[in-house]
């Protein structure tokens, strides 16, 4: 078990945090009529995973770019853009249902590709480009939708967000599929190896003949695509193309990736770790909700977790280099 | 035709011209020492050979083919390897992955999924290479950043030799090493020469240069100002060229 964790770069600490959090939340959550803690009911379990699915997929995008020593701050806004693009094509323009899927994924991937293009061709720092895209994508989402939600999507799309085949919500299946595919790509393909090497030492990667520009371009496109998938799920869940969807989700996504063991400075990243990170965020949010803690405090808690995770990591690495 | 030929290579960074039309040739299996003061342009010159820097003008041919406009990956394919002063290893990746970085052997699962890295093969071949070079590393599965400077240097050399290069460029390979480690690097260069691999050795340590190289080229302010056979020169003459005191 330990060996497996080491091989997949999953931190034992993050698993421990997840378990500890589950125990704490279980004790603090209110008791139902039948004497069971609300937190521990099967329904609540699915609620957690369902909520985690959206920003879990975003966090996978964040894992790809962060492990290459990049950053994508536009994830949440691109999610919103993807959500309204898909909905507008099907509801406003009355195109067939599958255009919602095509539109959401394409909008996400396109925004990511624009990020990648400007970063690699213009040598503008990823921090600035994606911060700019955070504004642009959100603005565009509001323009496309005239600032209002686009309601009333066809059955086929709602299935992706609201159905429960085999009793499990569809978004959970989508997240599992995306996570497995991403794990395979990051851990086992040359592309994944090159991503980590690029984040570890850019000169090294260049010297060994890796096409850095192409690599970055693809990484930001993947990140955008993940935002597109998350946007589609969001639309399907709430039956709305929502221009404010994913607001502040980049905070959740980046935090999930970091507490999952992805190195903020690149060179190390684990999709499985990120999934655990996403669950930690999901449990934290859900538990605080059950305890009726105001959403404002939740924002603070998540921000504090992000800072604490990076702080702890700094202490760890400094300790290691002193040895 | 020589293995490597440079003619009239020029390179500027903004307003600063670093290389002023360099001519240089290296034969197969030859060990050439490249010396010069700090800022003479040695590292820049080598990076134009590997393709990390593009040349402003001039021509580079390797193995009878013009490689001037080729990218680093392609030049590596053709047999030019470089071991960098700053090692250019990825510290968080393991030894085996570093050796195979950029050239991972892959296979297909069931013939349908995209190609994945054959980690078993990487580990086996990396171990073989490490053993052949007689290097001691605790494990090929630990991150390179946890190894000593000498061990890291040998990993960098192992990486260069794994793909049967024709020319290996070494930028100060002995600068940070202990005495015994220097000996093993120089032995390695000799071993490579016997296998017909040409080496360009950049070093400030003239002792090492005289021990390993048959020919010594002096670079000064971006020009080749001397091209000397080891047996016809001595350290004093080389030094006088380096500092620009030679009449």
Image: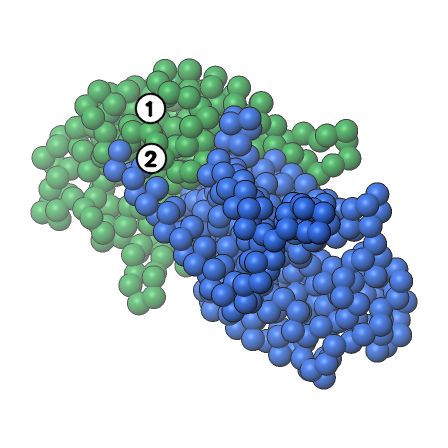
Chain colours: A blue, B green
Please determine whether, in this image, residue B156 is positioned above or below residue B85. Answer: above
Q: Chain of mark 1?
A: B
Task: Provide residue B243's location: percent of width, then percent of height.
Answer: 12, 46
Q: Chain of mark 2?
A: B
Residue drawn at point x = 48 percent, y = 50 percent: A258
Tell me, yes or no, if residue A206 can be seen here.
Answer: no
Q: CA distance from mark 1 to mark 2?
A: 10 Å
Residue furthest to the bottom: A146
How many residues crowd around disc 1 within 10 Å: few (fewer than 14), some, or many (20 or more)? many
Identify the mark nearer the N-term, 1 or 2.
2
Quadrant in the picture for residue A276: top right
Residue drawn at point x = 74 percent, y = 36 percent: B113
Q: Disc 2 on helix, strand or loop?
A: strand
How many residues crowd around disc 2 within 10 Å: few (fewer than 14), some, or many (20 or more)? many
Quadrant in the picture for residue A315: top left
Q: Are marks 1 and 2 in contact (CB under 8 Å)?
A: yes
- Quadrant of image for the N terminus of chain A: top right
Task: Provide residue B50's location: percent of width, then percent of height.
Answer: 43, 43
Quadrant in the picture for residue B121: top right
Residue drawn at point x = 74 percent, y = 59 percent: A233
Q: Residue A112 or A135: which is nearer the viewer?
A: A135
Task: Provide residue A247's location: percent of width, then percent of height.
Answer: 60, 69
Tell me, yes or no, if residue A323 can be seen here.
Answer: yes
Side of B70 relative to A168 (left or right):
left
Q: Residue B123 or A62: which is nearer the viewer?
A: A62
Q: Residue A31 or B32: which is nearer the viewer?
A: A31
Side of A162 relative to B10 (left or right):
right
Please determine whether, in this image, residue B207 is positioned above or below residue A241. Answer: above
Q: Which residue is mark 1?
A: B189
Q: Which residue is mark 2?
A: B170
Side of A227 relative to A9 (left or right):
right
Please determine whether, in this image, residue B182 is positioned above or below residue A204. Answer: above
């Amino acid at each position: 078990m330990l060996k497996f964790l080491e091989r997949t770069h999953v931190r034992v600490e993050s698993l421990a945090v997840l378990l500890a959090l589950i125990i704490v939340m279980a004790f603090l959550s209110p008791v139902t009529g039948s004497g069971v803690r609300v937190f521990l009911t099967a329904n609540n379990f699915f609620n957690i995973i369902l909520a985690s699915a959206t920003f879990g997929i975003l966090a996978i995008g964040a894992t790809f770019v962060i492990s290459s020593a990049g950053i994508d701050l536009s994830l949440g806004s691109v999610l919103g853009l993807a959500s309204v693009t898909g909905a507008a094509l099907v509801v406003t323009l009355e195109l067939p249902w599958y255009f919602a899927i095509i539109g959401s994924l394409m909008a996400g991937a396109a925004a990511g590709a624009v990020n990648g293009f400007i970063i690699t061709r213009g040598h503008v720092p990823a921090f600035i480009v994606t911060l700019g895209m955070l504004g642009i994508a959100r603005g565009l989402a509001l323009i496309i939708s005239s600032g209002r939600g686009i309601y009333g999507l066809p059955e086929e799309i709602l299935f992706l967000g609201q159905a429960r085949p085999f009793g499990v919500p569809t978004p959970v299946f989508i997240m599992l599929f995306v996570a497995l595919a991403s794990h395979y790509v990051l851990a086992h393909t040359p592309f994944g190896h090159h991503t980590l090497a690029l984040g570890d030492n850019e000169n090294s990667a260049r010297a060994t003949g890796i096409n850095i520009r192409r690599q970055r371009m693809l990484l930001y496109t993947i990140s955008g695509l993940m935002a597109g998938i998350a946007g589609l799920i969001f639309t399907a869940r709430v039956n709305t193309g929502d221009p404010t969807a994913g607001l502040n989700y980049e905070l959740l996504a980046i935090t999930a990736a970091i507490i999952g063991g992805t190195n903020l400075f690149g060179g190390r990243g684990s999709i499985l770790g990120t999934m655990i990170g996403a669950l930690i965020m999901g449990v934290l949010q859900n538990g605080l909700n059950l305890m009726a803690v105001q959403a404002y405090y939740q924002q603070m808690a998540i921000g504090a977790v992000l800072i604490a995770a990076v702080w702890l990591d700094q202490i760890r690495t400094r300790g290691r280099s002193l040895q | 035709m020589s293995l490597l030929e440079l003619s009239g290579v020029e390179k500027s960074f903004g307003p600063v011209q670093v290389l002023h039309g360099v001519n240089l040739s290296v034969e197969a299996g030859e060990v050439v020492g490249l010396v010069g003061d700090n800022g003479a342009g040695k590292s820049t010159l080598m990076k134009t050979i590997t393709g990390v820097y593009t040349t402003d003008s001039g021509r580079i041919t390797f193995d009878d083919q013009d490689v001037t406009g080729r990218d680093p990956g392609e030049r590596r394919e053709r047999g030019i390897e470089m071991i960098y002063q700053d090692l250019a290893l990825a510290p968080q990746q393991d030894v085996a992955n570093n050796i195979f970085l950029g050239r991972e052997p892959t296979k297909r699962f069931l013939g349908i999924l995209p190609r994945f890295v054959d980690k078993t093969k990487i580990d086996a071949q990396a171990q073989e290479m490490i053993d052949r070079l007689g290097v001691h590393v605790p494990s090929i599965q630990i991150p390179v950043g946890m190894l000593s400077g000498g061990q890291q240097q040998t990993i960098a050399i192992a990486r260069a030799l794994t793909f049967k290069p024709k020319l290996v460029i070494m930028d100060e390979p002995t600068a940070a090493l202990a005495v015994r480690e220097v000996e093993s690097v120089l032995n390695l260069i000799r071993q490579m020469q016997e296998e017909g691999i040409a080496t360009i050795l950049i070093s400030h340590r003239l002792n090492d240069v005289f021990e390993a190289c048959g020919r010594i080229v002096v670079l000064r302010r971006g020009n080749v100002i001397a091209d000397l056979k080891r047996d016809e020169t001595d350290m004093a003459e080389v030094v006088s060229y380096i500092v620009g005191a030679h009449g």
